[in-house]
Amino acid sequence: MSNVITFPKGRKDAPPQSLEETVENINRLRQDTLQATVNVLATNVMVMLGEAGIDVMEEKYMQDSALLIESLTSLVARSLDLGHALQEFAETCFTIDYNEDADSIDYKYVIPSNEESED
């Protein structure tokens, strides 16, 4: 018989034991927040589109709906200092013009040519 008592490991409510663990917890919380926020936003947008007479479940709208959801994900991810593949696309393909009156912002969609992307 031993005098050593084995304590349980990995309690769910145990505080982080290192800086790395703290960073992992923060990143997990950011990811959870991202997913929860996008779920709410996407649901609301899809409902609003349905109310406007657009059946987003129709096959012809599926890819547009996917792009919309990924765009929302990219936007929310950026607000949480998380990366997303569409962020670079947006930075490359859109130019923003701020109007002097500051009441509106114009954007232009610019498709980069193959020559530009080879530079």
Image (cartoon, helix red, strand yellow):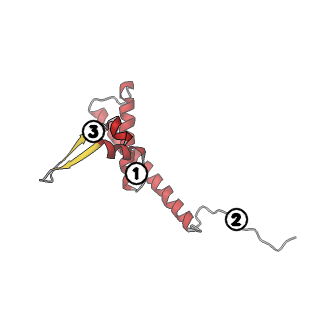
Q: Nearer the viewer, mark 2 or mark 1?
A: 1
Q: Point out the residue furthest to the bottom here.
A: 3
Mark-to-mark CA distance, 2 and 3: 58 Å
Q: Earlier in the sequence, mark 3 or mark 1?
A: 1
Q: Residue at x 35, y 29 (%)?
A: 61
Residue 24: x and y in percent read 53, 60
Residue 38 appears in the picture as rendered: yes
Who's the residue at 23% across and 47% down the image? 96
- Percent across and percent down for residue 111 are 30, 36
Where does the image place residue 48, in percent across and percent down from the top left? 29, 37
| Among the 4 quarters of the image, the one containing residue 51 | top left
Q: CA distance from mark 3 to mark 1?
A: 23 Å
Compared to 1, does 67 lie above or below? Answer: above
| Few, some or many residues within 10 Å of mark 3 (<14, 14–19, 20+) | few
Is residue 22 shown above or below 41?
Answer: below
Left or right of 93 in this view: 105: left
Indicate the quadrant where residue 113 lies.
top left
Left or right of 97, for residue 113:
right
Q: Amino acid at mark 3?
A: Val
SS assignment at label 2: loop
Q: Are marks 2 and 1 in contact (CB under 8 Å)?
A: no
Place residue 20 in its image quadrant. Answer: bottom right
Q: Which residue position holds label 1?
A: 77
